[in-house]
Image (cartoon, helix red, strand yellow):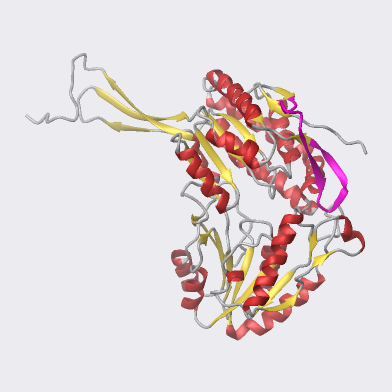
Amino acid sequence: MTYPTYHNLIGGAWVPAESGKTILNLNPADHSDVIGAFPASDAEDVARAVAAAKKASALWRLVPAPKRAEILLRTGMLLQERKEKYAREMTREMGKVLAETRGDVQEAIDEAFYVAGEGRRLFGQTTPSELPNKFAMSVRMPVGVVGMITPWNFPMAIPSWKLFPALVAGNTCVIKPAEDTPLSTCNLVQTLMDAGLPPGVVNIVTGFGPDAGAPLVEHPDVRAISFTGSSEVGSLVAQRAAATFKQVSLEMGGKNAQIVLGDANLDLALDGALWGAFGTTGQRCTATSRILLQRGIAAEFTERLVARAEKLRVGNGLDEQIEIGPQIHAQQIETSKKYVDIALGEGAKLLTGGRVLQEGAYSKGTFFAPTVFAGVTSTMRIAREEVFGPVVSLVEFDTFEQAVEIANSIDYGLSTALYTRDVNRAFTAIRDLEAGITYINAPTIGAEVHLPFGGVKHTGNGHREGNGALDFFTTWKAVYVDYSDKLQRAQIDNAE
């Protein structure tokens, strides 16, 4: 079998791992389809990448921000030209259907155009000084070398959320993409270089988390870490980064609830539930994994949801007729199976799915049937713990207040949705739901790049991507200019 061999990007050159070891990147819909071999990097490779980023920082930070932004603008234009090619390659390595991978590339295009505009809006403040003949202002400064660890479910969009604002702010970067989906990140960074990004400003090291991710987090020359992944790994990242006083941005898990009230448009709520629960095969941090149903409409909604779920077409995402692709690998399949068993043991009622798809064409990949559980209570593990698969739980409630309480009763707080025609309850939900994102009459998935993205509780540590990213990728410097030509003393009693 022949397949391409890819390399790390260090200092503008594509180079193999020092160890020579590689990882095979397989199509999760067809394991006989090998996308390529990628470096299995370790601490030595990370150190070389960080050194290259540190060297490039000396010049990149001096490039005017509007000029840095022009590179992002050209990147967005090139991504538009390459959208179909990159989407097809992403479907092969990640599995989600073409309509979604095209959207993933489009997200990177949108981010490029949005952040390019920020090159002329890196505003500070000017403020009166307490002393005469003295000028006071604040300016944004780059952080320095930033380490980035990104997941496999949005292998181009999420790297763009991190790389583009970091670059426009004047930072240099070392990114470790998920070992399952490195090609999409390589495609993104190659596009940046084709748009004029200087060598060493962005460096890529591929490999496993303990071997390449951990050394990146711990490297003393890395000033900040931006991480997207599980809450368990995010906690380790934060602890290890704290030893060298790095600032850390964490975007982690979710157990997102869609609330459907009795006055809702049920057709709309049903469409939202199907898309939110089974889009990306449920492998989104914003996926709808809980649907809270007011009792008066619960039976009808449940029956219609199950009927629709059973008609979803599962298969290879390169087929335009397919609606649900594979799970990323066998470990995710095992997790879905585990939670099906847990739910059954807790007394939940399996209405459809709950099984691995292995017959026929499914035998070559990792497929799981769209799964719906009813009879779920808010205390069950299936209603509290993240599955990251095509598994959704239905929980019934009596009052709006109960629904909000159930939605808030978990450790996560990323995305929530409410379907209702009652504007008063809509605004109450906006106020009271404990989440970084709340949708009214729309599913829990579908964030836009120009709004803050992130969550509360175990979902995140307070930082935001989207329009909040520049606050993480810059530091503030206060500047004082005294033109009085004499010593003036602030912070003492100057009253006469």
Residue 432 visible, this orientation:
yes
24 up-or-down from 30: above or below:
above
Q: Main secondary structure of the magenta part?
A: strand
Residue 345 image-quadrant placement: bottom right
Instruction: Measuring from the top left, give residue 414's x and y in whole percent.
Output: 54, 58
Instruction: Measuring from the top left, give residue 324's x and y in whole percent.
Output: 78, 61
Q: Which residues are magenta?
A: 15-37
Magenta segment: does it hold 182? no
Q: Residue at x 55, y 32 (%)?
A: 146
Residue 300 image-quadrant placement: bottom right
Q: Quadrant of the N terminus?
A: top right
Instruction: Measuring from the top left, give residue 58's x and y in whole percent.
Output: 53, 18
Q: Residue at x 52, y 20 (%)?
A: 62
In the picture, measured across the screen, residue 292 lies left or right of residue 487, that is right
In the picture, measured across the screen, residue 409 lies left or right of residue 92, that is left
Instruction: Measuring from the top left, give residue 45's x and y in whole percent.
Output: 66, 28
